[in-house]
Amino acid sequence: MPATNSSTSPAAGTVRFATLGPGGTNHELITRRYLASQGIDDFEIKLILSFKDAITMLLEDTVDYVMQCAVHPETPQTLGENFRSVFAIDCFISDSQELAVLSRRDVQRPESIGVLLPANEKYTDLSRWKQVVSYSSLPLINEALLVGEIDSGLVYRAYADKHPEVLRVDEVIGSPDDVWIVYGRKRAFKEKLIGFGDGAFLDDVRVRLTERAAARPRAAVHID
């Protein structure tokens, strides 16, 4: 179902995005955050379960843009299979919702865990569980956790606050700073590298060079 900022059907001036659902994903959160940063108030976000569907919608002009996290399992496919017709037109860095390993309170020794693979497989030691089950999004992992299909899930920490009678927090992982990609149908690259206008690279270079110069041993001064 579309997540829209308009009370009516999309108008001619509405910016239409597709990104990963169901509702409550980091993809939806970051898409909203990105649109706010661009000063866009009139928008519609269509939530999909596969980026293949999102790209089809983009090519059929059902949406104008697609938002995807760079570490999502489908990202290589999104870029590789469609490079002649779909283009990365913007990217940025953002944190998102805090992650944690949650387990059911009625399970003392969890044996199964749901994870978004391979994107999140290194966030914790998965060898602690006998069974690792792959899901396409964190809300789907949470749904499986709540109904008892799995004992644990690597999901948003906020789910434990929403369901304290069912879930406990076993490990807080935090929120990584991910790279996010915006796709469109018109190529942005035109022989000149496109970089961040407010990126931290040059600031970091200046700090590192200053620290390196300060740490360099000074030559001894000899007075005859």
Image (cartoon, grey):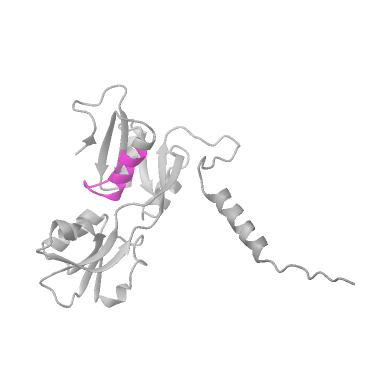
Question: In the displayed image of the protein, which residue is found farthest to the right?
Answer: 224
Please state the extent of the stretch shown in magenta in the rendering. Answer: 18-35
Q: x, y (%) of residue 58? A: 35, 35
Give the left or right position of residue 165, taking residue 203 as reference: left
Position of 27 relative to 45 (above/below): below
Q: Is residue 215 magenta?
A: no
Question: In the displayed image of the protein, which residue is found farthest to the front?
Answer: 224
Question: In the displayed image of the protein, which residue is found farthest to the top?
Answer: 12
The foreground one among 76 and 213 is: 213
| Residue positioned 50% across, 42% down in the render | 198
| Residue positioned 49% across, 34% down in the render | 187
Q: Is residue 200 visible?
A: yes
Q: x, y (%) of residue 16? A: 31, 32
Q: Is residue 115 visible?
A: no
Position of 87 relative to 104 (above/below): above
The foreground one among 31 and 53 is: 31
Res 87 quadrant in image: top left
Position of 126 relative to 49 (above/below): below
Q: x, y (%) of residue 102? A: 21, 66
